[in-house]
Amino acid sequence: MSDKVRDKIKHAKQFDKAVKRAQTKLASTLDIKQVRKACKALAEFVSKPAPGSSKGKQLFDESEDKGIYVTFTLTQVPTKPTPKPL
């Protein structure tokens, strides 16, 4: 096995460990009730007519995707930053 392949395997294992640590930390500090409340509020906001629309047009058309993306940001700088995004 070449050195490049070994490095890729090593980095993949390190990445998996980092993801598992982040998921565990997030699960232990995240308030599920607050997340549900925020998601309900966001879904309600999306279903309301767009501001300034005279015909009651919704914020998103029916033909558009109905998915809602929620982004979590870090409140702490990683201790071992990497040039590649996780």
Image (spheres, grey):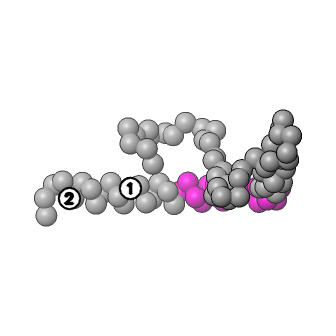
Locate residue 47, reporting x and y percent. Answer: 81, 54
Tag shown at residue 43: none
Residue 22 appears in which quarter of the rendering? bottom right
**Label 2 is placed on what type of residue?**
Val
Identify the residue under disc 2: 5
**Label 1 is placed on what type of residue?**
Gln
Locate residue 12, reporting x and y percent. Answer: 35, 58
Tag shown at residue 14: 1
Q: Residue at x 30, y 57 (%)?
A: 10
Q: Residue at x 62, y 42 (%)?
A: 73
| Magenta stretch encompasses residue 26 | yes
Nearest-to-viewer mark from 2 and 1: 2
Q: Main secondary structure of the magenta part?
A: helix
Residue situated in front as seen by the camera: 58 or 27: 58
Label 2: state its secondary structure. helix
| Disc 2 and disc 1 in contact, CB within 8 angstroms | no
Residue range (magenta): 21-37
Furthest-bottom residue in this view: 1
- Vertically, is 1 above or below 73? below
- Vertically, is 28 above or below 81? below
Q: Residue at x 72, y 50 (%)?
A: 60
Label 1: state its secondary structure. helix
Q: Is residue 35 left or right of residue 22?
A: right
Residue situated in front as seen by the camera: 69 or 71: 69
Locate residue 5, reporting x and y percent. Answer: 20, 58
Locate residue 32, reporting x and y percent. Answer: 77, 60
Q: Residue at x 49, y 56 (%)?
A: 19
